[in-house]
Each structure stands twice: as C-alpha cells, then as structure tokens.
C-alpha cells in the first residue's frame, strides 16, 4: 500500500532541528507511528522504541533513568503516555544537555493535560499535532485555504459537485488511515474496535476515571449531538451521572483527541468563558460509525447532514492549521439567533468567519451571522465564507 505524504513531515523535522524534545500528539491510529518511524530512518538517524511493546514499556517503567541514559542516539519513543515516569528522566537528561533533536515523543493523549506528567517538561518541548488525513492529503495535494483566506483571497470555485450526497462517501469515511484503506462494510468494525480499545486502555492511562464505560456512553451521546452547544445538565441526565462528572469525562475525551471543544467568540475576552461552547467529534468517520449512519441518512436526514457537514469543516480546518507557522485559534459565534459556525482568529486579532450549509442553495439570510460579526469587528474581519454543497 502506498504511503500518503503528510503535510506535517517537514514541520516535525524542522522542530527536531531546534528543540531538545518534540512531542507529536494526536488520536490513536492517526498515523503518528508511521510518520515517526519514517522520520527516524530517513531524516533523523534515530532509534525507534514503542511503549505499546510490553518488554520495552516494562523496562522504561522499572528504570526510567537507566532507560533514558542508555539512549546514545536521537530516539523516537512512541506512545510515551504509557510510561509517564520517563518524562522526568528525559527532563533531567535535556537539562544537562541542551543539544536539539534528542527525543521525538509521540502520544495519543495530550501530555500537557495528564495529571501525572503535565509539569514534567515545561519550556523544553515543542508540541505538534498530527490529525487523521485531510482531504488534500488523500488527494495528494497540500491545501492553502487558510493562508489564502487570511490574505483576503476569497475562494473562486466553479463546477463543484452539487448536492450533499456527492460528499457523503468522503465524510462517512473520515480521515483515519485504517478507515480510509477499508471498504465500507469493514469500516464499522474498525471504529467499534477503535473505541473499545481506547475506553478499555487509554482512558485509564490518561485519567483517574473510575467508570470508563460511562465515558464510552457519553462519547456515543456526543456523536448524536456533534456541532451542538454543550448542555452539561441535559447530557448528565441522559448518561445517568452528575454534571460535574460529565464535564470531567468530556475533558478526558478531549485529552484523547476524540472530542473538540469550540468556545464562543466574543469581543469581551471575559464573555468567551461564560457562553456555552460547542462540541464536535474529531473525525466524521468516527462520528458516522458511532451513530450508525450511511449514505441514505446523509441524503435524507437534514439534521444529521447539517451536523456532519459542520463537524467536517470544523475539524478539517483545524487539521490544515496544524502545519501553519502561525498559530490559529478556533471559536464559534452566536448573538441571539445569528451565528457563525467557525470563527478563526490570528494572534494579531484578525478574524475569518466560516458558515457551513449542507444544502446546495445559499440565500441572503444565510449571511446574517457573518454580517453581524463584520459589524462587530470592522476591519479586523478579513473575510467571511459560506461553504455549501453547491457549484460555487
């Protein structure tokens, strides 16, 4: 099977040339191990060790200082969250030796938010994200939508496929390499095993949750509400746990890169924290498998199609942002009945608004949220775009 080129490849290699430690984080099965192994052999001249290998993990956990001291070459350590004791040993090593490119760590949990390791490597590690494939990576091209739109270059697309059914297969497949490689009949088995393995193993590695099964129940419930505002009390009633536990479980799911949280954008920074966030499943293939959707449902169920398309755009844009040199932050906007699905902000304060429609027709009222946002921002708003299933 031909390997698909990843847009993050050069970014990771360049980070290793300047940082003592680089952590490449993202969901399981997104391709981190494949990319790390390739870089170890072809670009870094590094050893490769995986903590999914029981003997390696046992050695690392039993004697982390000795394990790290034995590394005489640059080293890739895959799934490092499985032996968090290693991080303090790595800290001690790189504090003594400031040479760049000593360790490339990969992890399927956000190391900065795991209680046991969150303070281990402050200021000593560059954090990068690797998500499942973008549509451009699948097609063999590198997307530049975000770069162009922040230059004020509106997309000039003609003769695009018309109708949401034309996009159904791509959205139902999603971007996980294994799902992309399988026929539709086998994808549901992959996603079922994928979720079960994360709930059974990774939840315990990344959290102190006592009832992992309730995390799985909540994940399936969130899939049915992807793109909706987070109503913690309602979720708590449906899962049968209290609201505080729901928030804790959602934090775990975000830590494992299964759920993405989009807080509400507001001119007043304080107001961004009090307005309800939106929640998305991090991949449309995973979302579709969790709710049991097929092409017929994309075609016939307006509510599901709207949530699926919005989830796709929100997650696809975050993936494309991961390799840009300038960090971007992602929000949603709501003012009364006017909303913008995705608000993208630069550190300079420049903003782009993106509204998503599953239909093939755009009407003037569909621009209401973007117009409202422009009225609030003036020249700070660089562009507003509607992405829809029509020709333009």
Image: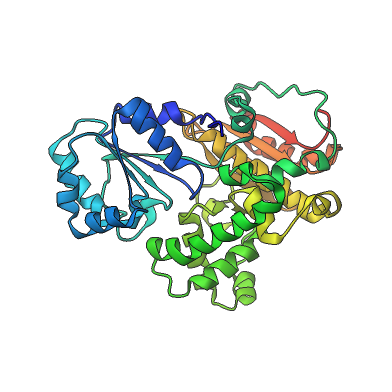
Residue 226 seen in this snapshot: no
Residue 348 seen in this snapshot: yes
Q: Is residue 6 left or right of residue 369?
A: left
Q: Quadrant of the C terminus?
A: top right
The foreground one among 353 and 293 is 293
Q: Quadrant of residue 44?
A: top left
Which residue is at the far front?
1
273 to 234, vertically: above or below: above
Q: Position of residue 141 (x, y in %)?
A: 61, 24
Q: Position of residue 353 (x, y in %)?
A: 66, 36
Q: Position of residue 284 (x, y in %)?
A: 65, 48
Q: Quadrant of residue 278?
A: bottom right
Q: Who's the residue at 39% across and 69% down the image? A: 208
Q: Position of residue 272 (x, y in %)?
A: 54, 51
Q: Quadrant of the N terminus?
A: top right
Q: Who's the residue at 32% across and 57% down the image? A: 54
Q: Who's the residue at 76% across and 24% down the image? A: 157
Q: Is residue 226 left or right of residue 357?
A: left
Which residue is at the far left?
96
Q: Is residue 124 left or right of residue 343?
A: left
Which residue is at the far bottom?
240
Q: Who's the residue at 64% across and 34% down the image? A: 135
90 to 274, vertically: above or below: above
The foreground one among 87 and 302 is 87
- Number of callouts: 0
The foreground one among 171 and 244 is 171
């Amino acid at each position: 099977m031909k390997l698909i080129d990843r847009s993050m490849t050069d970014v990771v290699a360049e980070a290793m040339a300047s940082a003592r430690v680089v952590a490449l984080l993202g969901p399981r099965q997104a391709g981190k191990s494949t990319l790390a192994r390739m870089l170890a052999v072809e670009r870094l001249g590094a050893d490769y060790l995986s903590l999914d290998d029981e003997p390696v993990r046992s050695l690392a956990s039993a004697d982390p200082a000795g394990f790290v001291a034995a590394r005489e070459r640059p080293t890739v350590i895959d799934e490092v969250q499985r032996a968090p004791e290693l991080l303090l040993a790595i800290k001690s090593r790189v504090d003594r030796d400031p040479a760049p490119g000593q360790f490339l760590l990969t992890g399927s949990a956000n190391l900065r938010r795991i209680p046991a390791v969150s303070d281990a490597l402050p200021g000593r590690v560059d954090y990068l994200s690797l998500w499942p494939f973008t549509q451009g990576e699948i097609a063999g091209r590198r997307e530049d939508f975000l770069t162009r739109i922040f230059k004020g270059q509106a997309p000039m697309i003609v003769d695009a496929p018309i109708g949401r059914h034309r996009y159904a297969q791509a959205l139902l497949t999603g971007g996980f390499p294994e799902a992309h490689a399988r026929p539709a009949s086998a994808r549901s088995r992959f996603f079922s095993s994928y979720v079960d393995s994360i709930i059974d193993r990774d939840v315990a590695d990344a959290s102190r949750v006592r009832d992992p099964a309730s995390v799985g129940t909540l994940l399936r419930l969130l899939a049915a509400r992807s793109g909706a505002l987070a109503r913690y009390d309602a979720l708590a009633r449906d899962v049968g746990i209290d609201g505080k536990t729901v928030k804790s479980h959602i934090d775990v799911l975000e830590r494992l890169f299964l759920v993405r949280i989009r807080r509400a954008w507001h001119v007043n920074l304080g107001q961004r924290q009090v307005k309800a966030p939106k929640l998305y499943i991090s991949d449309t293939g995973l979302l579709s498998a969790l709710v049991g959707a097929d092409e017929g449902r994309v075609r016939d169920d307006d509510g599901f199609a709207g949530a699926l398309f919005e989830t796709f755009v929100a997650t696809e844009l975050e993936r494309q942002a991961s390799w840009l040199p300038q960090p971007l932050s992602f929000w949603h906007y709501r003012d009364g009945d006017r909303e913008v699905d995705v608000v993208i902000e630069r550190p300079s304060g420049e903003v782009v608004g993106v509204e998503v429609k599953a239909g093939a027709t755009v009407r003037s009222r569909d621009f209401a949220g973007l117009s409202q946002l422009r009225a609030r921002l003036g020249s700070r708003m660089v562009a507003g775009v509607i992405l829809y299933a029509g020709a333009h």
